Amino acid sequence: MPKKKEKIKGYRLDLLICAGTGCVSNRSFIVKEALEKEICRRGLQDEVRVIATGCQGFCERGPIVIAQPDAIFYQRVTEKDVPYLVEEHLIKGRPAKKLMYVPEKEALPIPKMSDIGFFKHQRLIVLRNRGRLDPENIEEYIAFDGYQALQKVLTSMSPEQVITEIKKSGLRGRGGAGFLTGLKWELCRSAAEHPKYIICNGDEGDPGAFMDRSVLEADPHSVIEGMLIGAYAIGAQKGFIYVRKEYPLAVKRIHIALKQAIDYGLLGNNILGTEFNFFIDVVQGAGAFVCGEETALMAAIEGRVGRPRTRPPYPVEKGLWGKPTNINNVETWANVPVIIMRGADWFSSIGTEKSKGTKIFSLVGKINNTGLVEVPMGISLREIIYDIGGGIPNNKEFKAVQTGGPSGGCIPKEHLDLPIDYESLSAVGSMMGSGGMIVMDEDTCMVDVARYFLNFTQQESCGKCVPCRLGTKQMVEILNRIVEGNGKEEDIDLLETIGKNVKLASLCGLGQTAPNPVLTTIRYFKNEYIAHIKEKRCPALVCKALISYVIDPELCTGCVACAKNCPTKAITGEPKKVYKIDQQKCIKCGICLTVCPPKFNAIKKVSPALV
Amino acid sequence: MIKLTINNKEIEAKKGETVLEVCRREGIYIPTLCHQENLTPYGGCRLCVVEVQGSSRPMTACTLPVEDKMVIRTDTPQLHELRKFTLQLILSEHPYSCLICDKTKECGNYMECIEKEPITFGCKYCSKNGDCELQRLVEEFDIKEVPYPFHYRNLPVEDYDPFFERDYNLCVLCGRCVRACAELRHAFIIDFHHRGPKTLVGTPFNMPHLEVNCQFCGACVDACPTGAMRERYSKYLCKGDKKTKTYCMLCSMGCAINVETKENKVIRTVPEQEPLCVRGRFGIAPLVNHPKRITAPLLKKNGQLVEIGWDEALDTAAKILTDYQGKTGIIFSPALTLEAINSLNTVAEIMGVEDFGVELSVMENFEQVCFEKKDKKSALIVFNTDLIEDFSVFLLKLRKFFNEKPIIIVVDPIRTKLAELADLWLQIEPGKELEILNLLLSNEKPENFAGVKKQEIIEARRLLVRREICVIYNPKNMGAVPLNDKLKCYPLVSTLNYNFINNARMPRINDILKNDKIECFYLIGASLPVSKVHKKVIVQDCFLPDFEFDLFLPAATFVETEGSFVDLMGKEKKLQKVIEPYGGAKSDEWIIKNITERLDFEMTKSPAHRKSSELEREIQESVTKEYPFLLVVRENGYRFRNKPLSEILKGFQRIHRDGYLWVHPEDAESMNLKQHSQVKIIARDFETMMPVYVTDRVSKGVVFSYYDPAKGLIENRAVRIECVK
């Protein structure tokens, strides 16, 4: 039982400063220190409190400070802004307008968090506590109804009832495959062998994805509570949280949370005075993408090389050390307490017919509002990209969005109104994955993108099965020769054949999805491939071998900026006269393009290459 | 019973079987590459994919457990295409020029010398040609082209280890070697490196196998489906044309071997079913075909060795034995067939030879080693025996008897390979082994004892709590034998026929040497410190001895003879004659019988007093100022008849340092000894010369050598060491 509580002291104002990894790397801890110092200097330490919270999601605008109770949103706060913020908001009692968020193309700042487009369209279930509590303090979690679901389960529900509730809610695995969580629990519970284990998969290896990290950093107790409920339902006594070593802050906060939970009698023997015992160990990953695959992850926990094995037998029958094991992703576990508290009916009222609840996406790439968003299933891509994401920067045109991590597919403009759920995404050749969402604009070459992602999966393949190890390698080699201008006409067909077969014949999810970026870009952007192969032209002017830099004689004023900066002395001419690039000498580094003053804008990229 | 449908055929199967097992049993063909029956399924090569009704993608038959009402297809065009695709991908990493060349057959007729081709770039130059699983698959799938560019890894061939070499350019990463090493041998020497397209098989940090405690059992070589791992000795001999089952007689295990022959020549020996050790796997073929083998009888005439015919040789032998009746000692190696030993016994009886004995130093009441399945938690206490080096196959068999992995405590003054892997190693002073056993089992207050620390004794007692204790020891390496009613004691010796000889109560070599009446020796696969007093010496062996002799009778090896022998477990095993004896060599039995026939005297009554095997144990000598080192002598498990294998085959020199005196680095430094420097070993009763092997496997003040009666190294002694320039 929780120890004797200190009386929580009341404050006039709370300043919630974001301490997610994004804001921390933008010096949010330094800002926090400066704020505290300034508040002390002004003698406000008994009235105003500064709290470091988990990720707010709007990482583009970090470090973020939210002044409660009015929920005034301050963005990009630096330590230089601190005296101004304290002076305006805390002393004079008026919002500090200079630090407020102004949407692109608009003039007036939006003071309230709930009015900002980025937040307005989100529906927070998993991230319900984001930015409103201190993740390193269990009491704050408890104050926001934390561990009530656990209490409800332990005191008034049988394990079967819990499983029925989760099944009824329609919650599906958020790790990518979308298997019904309740069904998985039931299978694990009904497995004959003992002991049983449960695992929280926090090995989030997708480039640009940070959902799990954010949940673990912002609200570790919700994951622990979810695991406790799952363990009770399944009949497990031991759980593991497998988290990437590359997430030091998340690891630190899990450890703090676990220690606090043990101190409060929420973990260990006789939890909340019942017969139920449960223990959690943290295992840190060693940097292999493939360890996100459940069988590889279990091998890694057992201390073996992280390589997947074939299924069946599935982990629910033979998992860790050959015992029944239930493995769910961080986000799935964090959903559990809410479902128990608010009921399966409430949860299943959100989302589409087959996909219930919400999904977190990490919105990155060519987008105005980079960040973490939680949206109900069934929302359209357009809403996410334009209403929440604020559209594409620099008035560029949207080209495609890649969902589901490096092995997801690229979805083109035509499908922007697609309602997002597991089925619809796979219907267009992509997948839900763990929820990465990379937006691409007109300056992105789709062949190059496919090559980039495939190169990643190829290198991260464990090397066990032939199709994944060698099939992806052959595909990368073909893509390499296409972007280098050596593509052959039959290459597109060959790519499609290999891709199709690799998907069919590979052992684990990595190989079974790795060709997706190539297959979808061929499906939706075949003309770009043809341009690369037949015309030796890169329509997006990206592939180095297929472009040349030229100086527009009409625009060049002979300012010498380019010639001075050219590393190979390829640019020649006389001052005040038109300069010229010697294509033989040019190494296409692009420096001339960046140094050419925007008012002249005389350097142009052309494709196909001139030489 | 489970009923499933495979290719529209109803089939019954047992729970727990895989689809591949069922198909194999039913004669339904499914191609495989990474699968090997005695290894856990891997599912890596994806060639065994089958279609399962209700599953969106094909599954690998090797890993798929059967389920009731399963409907499976193994032969659809789509599966064929998928398998072909996978195989072509495999070929993109394996030199395939010969595999898809349409001139392969004609080209094969123009045989060049493959020994001149250092790099394997095609089947024609590969040692696995004709025996390669990839070759067979390519033929089966009729692959005529590979649509992908060929990627050659361009790795150097790893040829720096003895016995086998590795060309990972040919590796298809099926993982069979890795699993064989781990699962069949529990050795864990090789595993996968890196990931993705850079994946490779190798040792930790790519160190030579020699440095990572590889046992060179060859399990990996036998598992390799391609030519990536190949035996050095037979790599240019390719595939044999006949396989014959017989037994290995290089140690007391007597493992079953399959001898592969080609035109009456032994090419290689491979495991029958049970695993082999380095001796049986790599030792036999080069031994039988060794260029230094003597295949014609030799007679010393006027100080010169002359080749003679068998008639003359047998007559001479019979004449010498007749001449020296009553003054002849007959000593034989225990590694002969029972038939040969019996015929020798007849000779001895006919001649009334008093001094007839076996080359064994210590005789014991020898219990047969037998293990029953143990459910209880067990602990093994191993005394002075390196189970890994000398009895690796026995250790593997032993593991199967225990449901739970037993605790292993090693009591040994020498840091053996087993000591390195044991749960606890007590490095005790030589000669105190048994006292520590009593100390471990008693409740006495633990104290530092003979080099073993108090904490170690406490730790050992803690490990032994509530465990059934088995004691394993090599009687030949012990001053005394553990006798304890409460314990199960299992003696292990490397010597063959130990039981048989023991029951016959034949005397040991020391007693014979002490008899100064003897003027003539008849040595059958045995060696002795022969001196000038011995006027006539007849040697019957495969290789020349390193002492003077008068008559040499070339004997056949155990693959060239019929006969039987008794193994460690007391089981009699029948040898098969695999090939005709090399050159003019004859079997021991044949030679002895023919000599007997020519002996020119009537059979005497059975000898009045054959030496009995009653023993007076040498009391452990203690070191003195004059003899400051304690020489520990161990049975040499790496011998062929009388000769250490290392003297015959180079590879064994590198893995087994016999013929050396092991000295601790600090002792070596104080005496200014370097690696391989010659020293004189002086004990109270003998003197000999030996090179030095400086190693920290021995402790300070202790020197070590393997048993070598020709040098007088028979038992533990206090010795003095002198450096010889």
Image (cartoon, grey):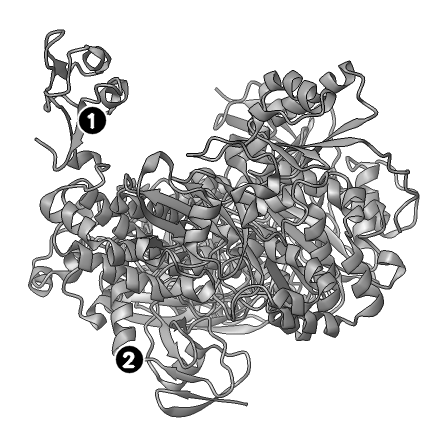
Horizontal side of residue B426 vs B446, given as left or right: left
The residue under label 1 is which amino acid type? Answer: Lys
Give the class, few, some or many, for how many residues have Cα within 10 Å of label 2's Cα (few <14, many ≥20).
few
Residue B191 in view in this figure = no
Q: In this view, which residue lies farthest toward the top?
A: A575
Q: For numbered disc 2, what is the local secondary structure?
A: loop
Chain under numbered label 1:
A
Give the class, few, some or many, for how many residues have Cα within 10 Å of label 1's Cα (few <14, many ≥20).
some
Q: Quadrant of residue A147?
A: bottom right
Q: Which mark is residue A312?
A: none
Q: Quadrant of residue A608?
A: top left
Q: For numbered disc 1, what is the local secondary structure?
A: loop
Q: Nearer the viewer, residue B260 or B104?
A: B104
Q: Nearer the viewer, residue A336 or A354?
A: A354
Q: Position of residue B652 (x, y in %)?
A: 44, 45
Horizontal side of residue B12 vs B627, given as left or right: left
Q: Which mark is residue A588?
A: 1
Residue at the image position 44 percent from the left and 90 percent from the top: B11
Image height of A504 relative to B546, above or below = below
Kindly report the distance in space between the C-alpha atoms of the residues bearing marks 1 and 2: 51 Å
Task: Identify residue for label 2.
Answer: B76
